[in-house]
Image (cartoon, rainbow, N blue to C red):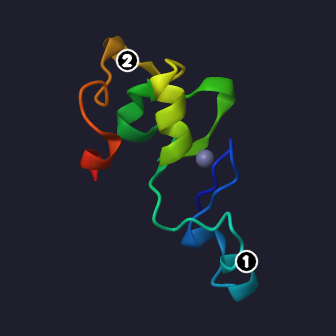
Amino acid sequence: MAMCDQCGNFDAEHTDGEPSIMALPDYQPDLYYYWHGDLEEEYTMPNDYQCLCEICFDINNSEGKIKWKNGKNPFKCASINSVH
Ligand SMILES: [Zn+2]
């Protein structure tokens, strides 16, 4: 399951296929969810977040709150959508 620690968006794995849960506005299966420890832990999330949807990740990243190993920020020069 994936659920954003900042805004509460979640993906299909979080619903257990339950229609009433999948009807909630926070059900956002098309978003990419970033996990703490992904990308060989090349980044550190703020506020001890374990999971962020791509929207919140992008906001935090643009605000400089995502700490990149070696200062390497793969999104600095490219749209986040091009990563998929
Ligand atoms: Zn979010």
Q: Where is residue 78 in the image (x, y as percent from the top left)?
A: 24, 34
Q: Where residue 60 is drawn, which disc sits there?
A: none
Q: Tell me where residue 28 sits by quadrant.
A: bottom right
Q: Residue at x 63, y 49 (%)?
A: 4
Q: Position of residue 31 (x, y in %)?
A: 47, 58
Provide the secondary structure element on which disc 2 rests: helix
Q: Tag 2: residue type?
A: Lys
Taking depth in this image into account, of 44 and 62 the one nearest to the observer is: 62
Tell whether circle 1 marks a residue whose Cβ is less than 8 angstroms from ligand 1.
no
Q: Answer yes or no: do the residues labelled 2 and 1 have beta carbons within 8 Å?
A: no
Q: Which residue is drawn at 31% across and 48% down?
A: 81
Dot 2 crowding, Cα within 10 Å, few <14, some 14–19, many 20+: few
Q: Residue furthest top?
A: 70
Q: Which residue lies furthest to the bottom in this view?
A: 19
Q: Residue at x 67, y 29 (%)?
A: 48
Inspect this view and state whether residue 44 appears: no
Compared with 57, 64 (above or below) is above
Q: Mark 1 or mark 2, which is nearer the start of the sequence?
A: 1
Q: Residue at x 51, y 37 (%)?
A: 57
Inspect this view and state whether residue 10 appears: yes
Compared with 61, 15 (above or below) is below
Q: Name the residue under label 1.
A: 21
Q: Mark 2 points at which residue?
A: 69
Q: Tell me where residue 9 sits by quadrant.
A: bottom right
